[in-house]
Image (tube, rainbow, N blue to C red):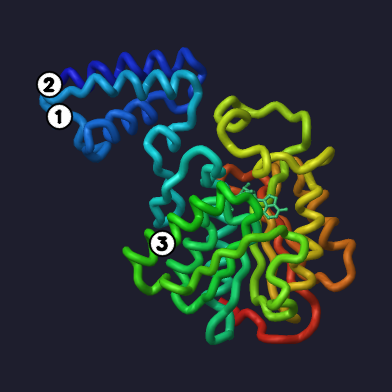
Amino acid sequence: MTLLLDEIAAATARLAEAGVDSPRADAEMIAAHVHGVGRGELQLVPDRDFDPRFWNEVARREAREPLQHITGLAYFRYLELQVGPGVFVPRPETEVMTGWAIDELTDMDVAEPVAADLGTGSAAIALAIAQEVPRARVHAVEADPLARQWAERNIARWADSAPHTRGRVTLDAGDFAGALPSLGGAVDLVISNPPYIPVGATVPPEVAEYDPAGALWGGEDGLDAVRIIEEAARRLLRPGGLVAVEHGAPQGAAVYWIFAEEQGWRDTRNHKDLAGRDRFVTARLGGSGPEVVAG
Ligand SMILES: C[S@@+](CC[C@H](N)C(=O)[O-])C[C@H]1O[C@@H](n2cnc3c(N)ncnc32)[C@H](O)[C@@H]1O
């Protein structure tokens, strides 16, 4: 047992005591970050190289600061994104919805499909689409100027490391309502992970204190922004275009009906996340137009 592994064991106990969900994984990731090694290389760090700053970072996590704010990084599908104060930390649940959109765009019989990511935050969804569907163009819309700075930084980083994404993701300042006015009727797929927590709901300290309020709260039933996204998608999509909207686990039926009750939508469907909970709704704008090739 090396000194670092002993310290990780002690930190794991402290994080568990503080109510952290995955104390060992978090202690290991903090240790890897502080020592500049991969998580699988921790046992190789010699005792003389133990960096006591490890304990400063453990104390931050113990105070329930999100791990991603401590390391400055979040992982989303095949992306490494910079995150910190002022931007929503992307979540694994959203990877499933993004994967659905990527599959649909890949199969779409359109030369250069156009997608719109409404409420892009760190640009996680927009960049994942650009990375995995190289012929797609993505318009990332964000109202919050602080969040937009993180999106800009991540889009620029990816343009440097994956040149095929350069110029394919455009960041637009603006509100969901009225977003992308020049693209009315021209978008192939609208995707959004909007704020959807009902006001007054209890959330963990990592969320309440560190995710921006504008990314979380969706009015009394949590669905204010979903209703605006439904209208925006109806305005932006071409006939036959697709929408995907994330929601909280108990909101599946309500979000289904926000789409199913409106004129114009067909194929409205609920989808589950990896834990088997209702997580997003998809629908197609009625009318003809390029259809998805069966796959
Ligand atoms: C839950 S976060 C999702 C961020 C990112 N798409 C993700 O999945 O990690 C919602 C985002 O929508 C933005 N937002 C909230 N209301 C908005 C509005 N009316 N117009 C534009 N953006 C909005 C928030 O600032 C926040 O960045």
Where is mark 3, residue-wise? 156
Image quarter of residue 263: bottom right
* Callout 1 secondary element: loop
Kindly identify the amino acid type of the residue bearing the numbered disc 2: Asp
Q: CA distance from mark 1 to mark 2?
A: 7 Å
Kindly identify the amino acid type of the residue bearing the numbered disc 3: Ala
Q: Residue at x 51, y 52 (%)?
A: 149
Q: Are marks 3 and 2 in contact (CB under 8 Å)?
A: no
Answer left or right for 286 relative to 71.
right
Rate crowding at label 1 as few (under 14), some (14 to 19) or many (20 or more) other CA atoms within 10 Å: some
State yes or no: Cβ of the residue under disc 2 lies below 8 Å from any atom of ligand 1.
no
Where is mark 1, residue-wise? 45
Q: Residue at x 24, y 40 (%)?
A: 38
Q: Which residue is nearer to you in this view: 218 or 153?
A: 153
Is 90 located above or below residue 69 in the figure? below
Q: Quadrant of the N terminus?
A: top left
Answer left or right for 92 relative to 187.
left
Residue sticking out furthest to the front: 145
Kindly identify the amino acid type of the residue bearing the numbered disc 1: Val
Q: Earlier in the sequence, mark 3 or mark 2?
A: 2
Give the percent coordinates (x, y) of residue 3: 17, 18
Give the percent coordinates (x, y) of residue 230: 78, 62
Answer left or right for 167 relative to 198.
left
Q: Are marks 1 and 2 in contact (CB under 8 Å)?
A: no
Where is mark 2, residue-wise? 47
Q: Is residue 272 visible?
A: no
Q: Which mark is residue 192?
A: none
Q: Which residue is nearer to you in this view: 290 or 276?
A: 290
Q: Residue at x 85, y 62 (%)?
A: 260
* Callout 3 secondary element: helix
Q: Nearer the viewer, mark 1 or mark 3?
A: 3
